[in-house]
Image: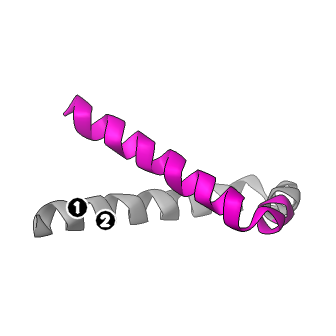
Amino acid sequence: MAHAIVQAVGLVFVLEGLIYAVAPFAMKRMMADLPKLSDEQLRIVGVAALALGVAIVWLARMLA
């Protein structure tokens, strides 16, 4: 179980680093736009991302 968590955290860093490496201008623009969003909008995006992540992990485990 701990091995899977470490792998998942590592994958998060890989994906995060890839975004910064491939499109740093897009990340800067997105970071500049974040304060313009309300707390409710950010919360909705966060919950949607959480749900998508859970669905992807669930689907991957079901197919494995």
**Along the viewing direction, whichever of 7 and 62 lies nearer the viewer:** 7
Give the Cα separation between the discs numbered 1 and 2.
5 Å
- Judging by the rendered image, the residue that carries numbered circle 2 is 55
Does residue 57 appear to the left or right of 64 in the view shown? right
**Closer to the camera in the image, 21 or 63:** 21
User: Could you say which is closer to the camera, residue 18 or residue 63?
Assistant: 18
Query: Taking 25 as reference, is 31 above or below it?
Result: above
Relative to 22, is 33 on the left or the right?
A: right
Report helix, strand or loop for mark 1: helix
The residue under the point 25% across, 40% down is 4
Whether the residues at callouts 1 and 2 have beta carbons within 8 Å, the answer is: yes
The amino acid at mark 1 is Trp
Q: What residue appears at the point 86 percent right and 54 percent down from the top-left corner?
A: 35
Q: Position of residue 13 (x, y in %)?
A: 52, 46
Q: Which residue is mark 1?
A: 58
Q: How is the image coloured?
A: one colour
Q: Secondary structure at mark 2?
A: helix
Which segment did they paint magenta? 1-29
Left or right placement of residue 18 versus residue 14 in this view: right
Q: Is residue 11 magenta?
A: yes
User: Residue 38: where, in percent of width, then height?
Assistant: 78, 58
Q: Could you say which quadrant of the image residue 51 lies in?
A: bottom left
Q: Residues within 10 Å of mark 1 (few under 14, many from 20)?
A: few
Quadrant showing the C terminus: bottom left
What's the magenta bit mostly, secondary-structure-wise?
helix
Q: Amino acid at mark 2?
A: Ala
